[in-house]
Image (cartoon, rainbow, N blue to C red):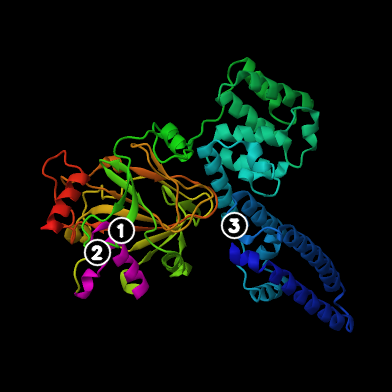
Amino acid sequence: MKTFLNHRQNITDNLRKYIEYEEERMIDLRKTTGYEEEMEVLTERIVKLRNLIEETESNITRDASTPIDDIVNNPVYTYVIIRDFLCNYRHWLNNQTSYTGRLHSFWDKAEFEAPTDLDLTETILAIIRIQYTYNISVQTITNGKYMGSNSPVLDKADIFDIAKKMHMYGYPQTALLWYLNALGELNEKIVDLPFDWSVALTRAIHIAKYMEKSELFDELLELGIKLDPGHKHTFYKLDIQSRMDTFHPREWDNLVPKPDWWKNYTILCNQEQKVNKLKRYHVCRYRDINHQVTYYKYKEEILHYAPFISLIYDVINDNDTNTLKERNASDLGLKFEFDEAGNSRHRPGSYGASVDLYDTEGPEISTISQKLGRVIGHNTQYYYPDRGFRLPSAGPFKVVDYGIGGYYDVHVDFFTSPTSTYLMKYSGDRMATMLLFLSDVEHGGHEIFTRLGISVKPIKNAALFWYNYTPSGYKDYRTVKMTCPVIIGQKWEARKSIWVHGNENNRPCGRSMKSTQFAVEKCLRNRVKH
């Protein structure tokens, strides 16, 4: 998206060059006969392209006062940018005539990444996900002050388009709010709206019936009958079916459910404090479990003791953060896949882009891994088992850019499948996880442990650390976690999984089933003393 915004001016410059090329060609065509029809087509085409340049430059002027980062981190602003481009350029991009072939050759020189219909759909889905999770009002999203930021005002046609997407993707309750907002005041003026009012009103009637909102259903149906005296639409038929009790609203096969944990999930995503209630083990300390070097100390905030979860501050510096973000950044891949028909769909439970960074890819990456090892007292190095080296004691860095509305669904970090991979067989399971925050996030993007009531807002250069196994060696399902959608801002993280192999002595087993991580740390300190 940044590349596109940076090159929008190049698009108009190259359009002008194309117009100059066609005008020179018209001069040559006038010298001969038989090209009168082509001259008319070229003249009409040039007029349209000049209007297109004028509108594009108007949009560029509108956005000039807003920093690019503020645009790409705001889902409403991004939606408007992509919508404007596709509305203006979709015809020219999809047309395959010889004329547009020459036009494309000029566009290729602009070196811009054109947004697609898929990008527009992904942005609308992000807005839907954010509103569904945080219960944000339609007015807050559409009035030009999205979460207190400056963003374009969405017109009625935009609101109707988003409502249709919500309707299609299984969010009827939320779609009803958008349909009603698009229709505005329920009176005769809705026939003048810049979209098909009958479609919006019919769908709102069906959802109101489905949600058993009888008063709203009667009001909407009465308005539809009043505005359709000629019975061109289905309102009169719906009224008869309603009176005969044969009106059955549409059933949503893809209705997005609200599972049992949904209420706690939304509470935690909106929670500012890290824990619901302070307990005796909520302490801050300097972490130096088994180090003999006194300056290897880091501020640590204990969030839970069983399972052990903590937030460690200033684990890395800005140089380390930039290294992880910029290294192989071009390899970041969106987490959607394609079916046999070529249609895109999300990979379940994730949204964003990620890339694996291995310790062998450079000394900077290896140095950061070693630094993390000193912080937590574990072997965090990754080795290639197929190259004659030692078996890996940790996974590579999984660097993630969550993008617009990025989230991560319910999951645990240890393997739940009984099928063992090669690394699982020889390196054991993911004993612990260290999650590095590579950026601050303006709103949203919390890491939450749904069963423990823990919600952690990303803090740049800090690390969220937890054990996936109990000290007695059992998988700890209490560590089930999620990532809340990013409302506004940009979230980057780097996840490092610590394996059992090579860390057996760094986390000895507890003496009993009830042993905690504090007992293990006491054992490690006594070992250092002796």
Q: Which residue is mark 3?
A: 72
Q: Nearer the viewer, residue 340 or 56?
A: 56
Q: Is residue 72 left or right of residue 290?
A: right
Q: Which residues are magenta?
A: 363-388
Kindly identify the amino acid type of the residue bearing the numbered disc 3.
Val
Q: Measure the alpha-carbon separation of dots 2 and 3.
A: 44 Å
Kindly identify the amino acid type of the residue bearing the numbered disc 1.
Lys
| Residue 338 appears in view | no
| Residue 131 appears in view | yes
Q: Nearer the viewer, residue 491 or 461?
A: 461
Q: Which residue is mark 1?
A: 297
Is mark 2 in CB contact (under 8 Å) with mark 3?
A: no
Q: Nearer the viewer, residue 192 or 359?
A: 359
Quick one: SS at disc 1?
A: loop
Q: In this rendering, is residue 226 above or below 474?
A: above
Residue 510 at x, y percent in the picture: 14, 46
Q: Is residue 140 left or right of residue 497?
A: right
Q: Which residue is mark 2?
A: 293
Q: Earlier in the sequence, mark 2 or mark 3?
A: 3
